[in-house]
Image: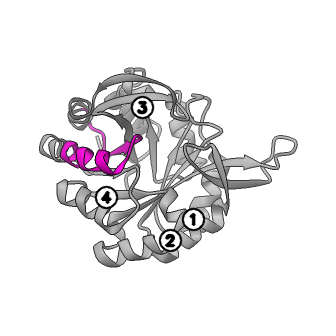
Amino acid sequence: MVAKRIIPCLDVKDGQVVKGINFLGLKEVGDAVEMGRSYSEEGADELVYLDISATFEGRRTFAALVEKIAREINIPFTVGGGVSSLDDAARLLDAGADKVSVNSAAIADPSLISRLASRYGSQFVVVAIDARCVDAADGVCGRWMATTHGGRVQTDRELFSWAKEAQERGAGEILFTSMDHDGTKAGYACEATAHLCESLSIPVIASGGAGNVSHIFDVLTRGKADAALAASIFHYGEIPIPALKRELAAAGIPVRL
């Protein structure tokens, strides 16, 4: 059985890891390189770095940071935030990133996914989808719609059809974040995640809502996710990765110890 992955997410601004809710109320929590090295040593399976202040100039600065990260860690890591062209991706991959993540730029121009996959291979391309529930009734979500700009701008892209198109265009993985759950520590969107996993043949990383071990267990079982991504519970030491993995393994979840 394929091992489930535990993936810390590090939102980076000016070289520092920051955390807020929907990218608002940001607080610095540590150095991007040092935290990445620590997570690597603790047993994280992968890392995701998101440049949340990406600009043309910042992209070059961030590439230099990626080089430092690549020298310090020995696990795969994905880099996203402002990746909108083959040149952006090339700069990050050349700097040492194992994968690139595209989000808003892919919604604006879906052919970007195809071009990235054609040049680098699907295994290098992660399509991130930040979605919100709309038309909810009696606690049941009617539709999940993709958003941009940290969940503040709703698009006309429906989550499941957009994920399917991304897969068909060559995405090797989907990173699904429920913006309704992000930062709440109230649990993941397990039903939507499960439906997403059932409709795709590529791995799905679940994001948004991790608050305790049970939430991660739920999204890896009931939610059928291939990987669980979390931020603050790791950044603030609420759930050490070694302890998390031991509990998951004891509950029958296949993880790398």
How far apart, in angstroms, are the residues tagged by discs 3 and 2?
Answer: 32 Å
**Is 175 positioned to the left or the right of 80 in the image?**
right
- Front one among 241 and 16: 16
**Image: magenta residue range:** 42-66
Residue 223 rendering spot, x and y as whole percentages = 59, 49
- Which of the two discs, 3 and 1, labels the residue nearer the N terminus? 1
Give the position of the C terminus as an image quadrant: top left
How far apart, in angstroms, are the residues tagged by discs 4 and 1?
Answer: 18 Å
Give the position of the N terminus as an image quadrant: bottom left
CB of mark 2 within 8 Å of CB of mark 1?
Answer: yes
The type of residue carrying mark 2 is Gln
Residue 3 rendering spot, x and y as whole percentages = 37, 52
At 62% across and 50% down in the image, what residue appears? 131
Q: Which mark is residue 245?
A: none
- Which of the two discs, 3 and 4, labels the residue nearer the N terminus? 4
Q: Quadrant of residue 91?
A: bottom left
Provide the residue designation for mark 1. 163
Count of marks overlaid on the render: 4
How far apart, in angstroms, are the residues tagged by discs 2 and 4?
Answer: 16 Å
How far apart, in angstroms, are the residues tagged by discs 2 and 1?
Answer: 6 Å
- Which of the two discs, 2 and 4, labels the residue nearer the N terminus? 4
Provide the residue designation for mark 3. 247
Q: Nearer the viewer, mark 3 or mark 1?
A: 1
Q: Which mark is residue 167?
A: 2
